[in-house]
Image (spheres, rainbow, N blue to C red):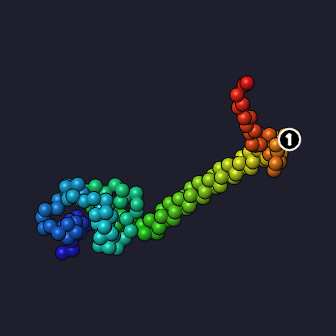
């Protein structure tokens, strides 16, 4: 007699966790088995291989127990019997997610370029104003102490000798 979906799922869980199948019940949770997110993902791959199907992402996110896995796989198998290609449906979901992610990434890059362009224009305007202000600054007249075109404050100070009065 062929195994039921429940028996197959319980066997996959047991093999994955390396425990006797009797320890796995319909109410066994991922938490009870000590599964982290990577374990859960690897278990999904094992279930997909066992049942020769792709489990859509939205159903993967709902998996929390053996019962969730059994019910989800039974629904996918029923859909498959009704002629619904769950693998093609999963692929279409994946493509839609990828397209949305690409569109979002491109929008962020365009916003970043726009912000960068605005910052560059602001910098250029500031530089032009600074250049104009510097060019209009009046030059001071040369004095006798002026050597290389500097102003009088650059000239060396002349010290007077202190002579005693008298």
One can see residue 54 in this view: yes
Q: Say if 125 sits above or below 165 in the image.
A: below
Looking at the image, which residue is at 44% across and 65% down? 90
Q: Disc 1 designates what residue?
A: 143
Place of residue 163 in the rendered image (x, y in percent of width and height, measured from the top left): 72, 31
Residue 148 appears at what percent x and percent y? 81, 50
State the image quarter where residue 27 is shown. Answer: bottom left
Q: Secondary structure at mark 1?
A: loop
Name the residue rendered at 48%, 62% in the picture: 93
For image coordinates 75% across by 48% down, the residue present is 127
On the rendered structure, is 97 left or right of 79? right
Q: Is residue 164 left or right of residue 14?
A: right
Tell me which corner region of the image, top left, top right, bottom left or bottom right, holds residue 105: bottom right
The answer to whether 68 is drawn above or below residue 5 in the figure is above
Q: Position of residue 12 (x, y in %)?
A: 23, 69
Residue drawn where x is 28% and y is 55% of the image:
64
- Residue 108: % across, % down: 59, 54
* 20 lies left or right of 49: left
> Which residue, as the protein is rendered here, is positioned at the far front?
166
User: Which residue is at the far right?
Assistant: 141
To which quarter of the image does residue 103 belong?
bottom right
């Amino acid at each position: 007699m062929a195994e039921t979906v429940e028996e197959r799922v319980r066997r996959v869980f047991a093999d994955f966790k390396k425990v006797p199948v009797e320890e796995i019940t319909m109410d066994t949770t991922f938490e009870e088995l000590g599964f982290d997110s990577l374990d859960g993902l690897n278990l999904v791959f094992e279930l997909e291989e066992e049942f020769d199907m792709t489990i859509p992402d939205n159903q993967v996110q709902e998996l929390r127990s053996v019962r969730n896995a059994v019910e989800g796989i039974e629904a996918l198998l029923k859909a498959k019997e009704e002629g619904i290609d769950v693998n093609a449906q999963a692929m279409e979901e994946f493509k839609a997610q990828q397209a949305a992610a690409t569109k979002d990434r491109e929008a962020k890059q365009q916003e970043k370029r726009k912000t960068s362009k605005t910052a560059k224009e602001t910098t250029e305007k500031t530089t032009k104003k600074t250049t104009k202000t510097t060019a209009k600054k009046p030059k001071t007249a040369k004095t006798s102490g002026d050597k290389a075109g500097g102003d009088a404050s650059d000239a060396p100070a002349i010290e007077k000798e202190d002579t005693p009065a008298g």
